[in-house]
Amino acid sequence: MECWKCGKKAVMHRKYEGKSWCGDHFVEQFESLAKETISKEGLFQSNEKVCVALSGGMDSTALLLFLDNLFENWRDAELIALTVDEGIEGYRDESIEIAKELCKDLDIELHIASFDDHFGKTLDEIMEDKDHGCTYCGVLRRWLLNKKSREIGADKLATAHNMDDELQSIFMNYLKGDMKRMVRLGAKPAVLDREKFVPRVKPFRESPEREIALYAKLKGLELHQTECPYVEDSLRFDVRDFLNDMESKRPSTKFTALRAFDKLLPKIKDGFSGDETSVRECKECDEITSGEVCKACQLRKKI
């Protein structure tokens, strides 16, 4: 295969557009797409302190490197990183070391928040007598990311959610009939004006997961590829497999589905804006929630 732009040896072929790309032109196009998302959605301002949720995995390390290069030309913008240590022996240890090494190389301040310090137990200890590891981990991680990023003064929390992540969430919420959660999707959240809420933004939302992996490889990033031992065969996996199968049979399915959702999202936000903005402080921990007691506190009582 040859690159359609320059004739050099291609590193990938995109079935959905019928074009092959060399490494240099792929990286250029990948970064242009992310910049377009940032500009179109107004994700960042020049004087903001942006915190990257850095797991040490493929997507988040690629995001940190991309934003570090981008922010070199942004006046008064500051980039920091936040890693959550759930306490998964063997698995998380490796990814934290990758995160530390990358932040050291880029001269970026890294903060680490652990389950043990904030919840009194590691995820390994929680899972000794609990099922549904992804449920506990996901809820507690989101709670901790918001709390810690606010405490270190972040104006925005950048996450490495990609096109595949977003589409899986869209289809899961639809299958569950949970339309209210649809409001939280998109490159930036619906709720922006709550004092204790750090807005989350997704610069890589338009990029397929496999292309982020290629971008990271071409950029020479060390990747943490071990699968979490608590990952469960969930609805998300079923939706993922369905979407991948459809994309394989009918290239561009994912792009078409995301564009269709983006056309519907403003109407969904209008229909559920009252429910979504009626947030309050949890009576247990004072963090933002839609009910009297947040989901994190409900789970903490069960630990």
Image (cartoon, rainbow, N blue to C red):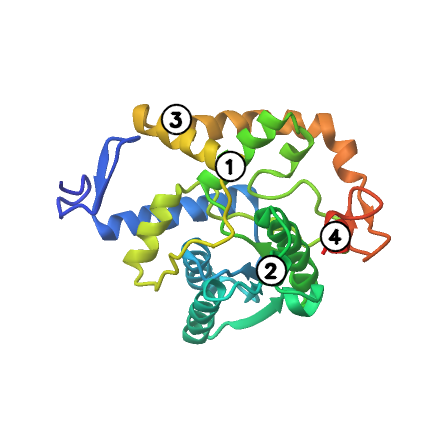
Residue occupied by mark 4: 302
Please tell me which residue lies in front, 159 or 85. Answer: 85
> What is the C-alpha distance between the residues marked 4 and 1?
24 Å
- In terms of sequence position, does the residue under pointer 1 or pointer 3 come before the other? 1
Q: Position of residue 31 (x, y in %)?
A: 38, 50
The answer to whether residue 56 shows anywhere in this view is yes
The answer to whether residue 47 shows anywhere in this view is no
What is the three-letter code of the residue carrying label 4? Lys
What is the three-letter code of the residue carrying label 3? Thr
- In terms of sequence position, does the residue under pointer 3 or pointer 4 come before the other? 3
| Disc sitting over residue 236 in the figure | 1
| Disc sitting over residue 253 in the figure | 3
**Judging from the image, what secondary structure is the residue with disc 2 in?**
helix
Query: In the rendered image of this protein, does residue 239 appear above or below residue 279?
Result: above
> What is the C-alpha distance between the residues marked 4 and 2?
13 Å
Quarter of the picture holding the N terminus: top left
Tell which tag, 1 or 2, sits nearer the viewer: 2
| Disc sitting over residue 123 in the figure | 2
Do tag 3 and tag 2 residues touch (Cβ < 8 Å)?
no
